[in-house]
Image (spheres, rainbow, N blue to C red):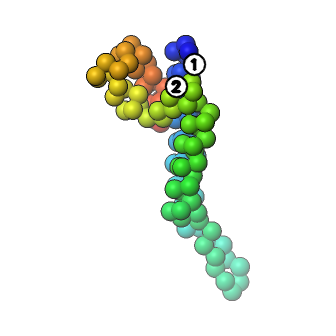
Amino acid sequence: MPLSNRLAAEFIGTLWLVLGGCGSAVLAAVFTASVAPNTFNIGIAHLGVALAFGLTVLTMAYAIGHISGCHLNPADTSKPACPVAIAYSTAAPATAPSTCAIT
């Protein structure tokens, strides 16, 4: 698999994780809807955030796992370069798209 395909897969996977997982944390806040005389909490809470992160990782594992290994984290991509599991020339560019997607 060409390096450009793996980099694109990691970028899309990390972007999906940030949008789906971290974006759900915004919805975890307790939003209240007032319908007289009752008030309802409509935030997704901790369970919703946990499900959002789990499902985003699951969908990316199936979608890009066969392309890039679905690391979704620059630290996981660069970690194997230390004991020579993958070449540094592959790990260094692979961390850049993930880091750019997060920031």
Q: Where 4 falls versus 70 (above or below)?
A: above
| Kind of residue at disc 1 | Asn
| Kind of residue at disc 2 | Ser
Q: Where 8 falls versus 38 (above or below)?
A: above
- Image point (39%, 32%), residue name: 76
- Image point (71%, 83%), residue name: 36
From this viewpoint, which residue is outermost toward the left?
83
> Toward the viewer: 53 or 62?
62
Q: Position of residue 72 (x, y in %)?
A: 48, 35
Residue 23 visible in the snapshot: no
Q: Position of residue 41 (x, y in %)?
A: 60, 73
Residue 25 visible in the snapshot: yes
Q: Position of residue 38 (x, y in %)?
A: 67, 83
- Disc 2 element: helix
Q: Position of residue 73 (x, y in %)?
A: 43, 35
Q: Crowdedness of circle 2 by 10 Å Cα count: few (<14), some, many (20+)?
A: many
**Residue corresponding to mark 1:** 5
- Image point (57%, 18%), residue name: 5
**Residue corresponding to mark 2:** 68
Q: Where 90 falls versus 15 (above or below)?
A: above
In this rendering, position of residue 3 left or right of residue 84: right
First in sequence: mark 1 or mark 2?
1
> Toward the viewer: 18 or 65?
65
Tags 1 and 2 touching, CB below 8 Å: yes
Q: Crowdedness of circle 1 by 10 Å Cα count: few (<14), some, many (20+)?
A: few
In this rendering, position of residue 37 left or right of residue 73: right
- Image point (35%, 21%), residue name: 85
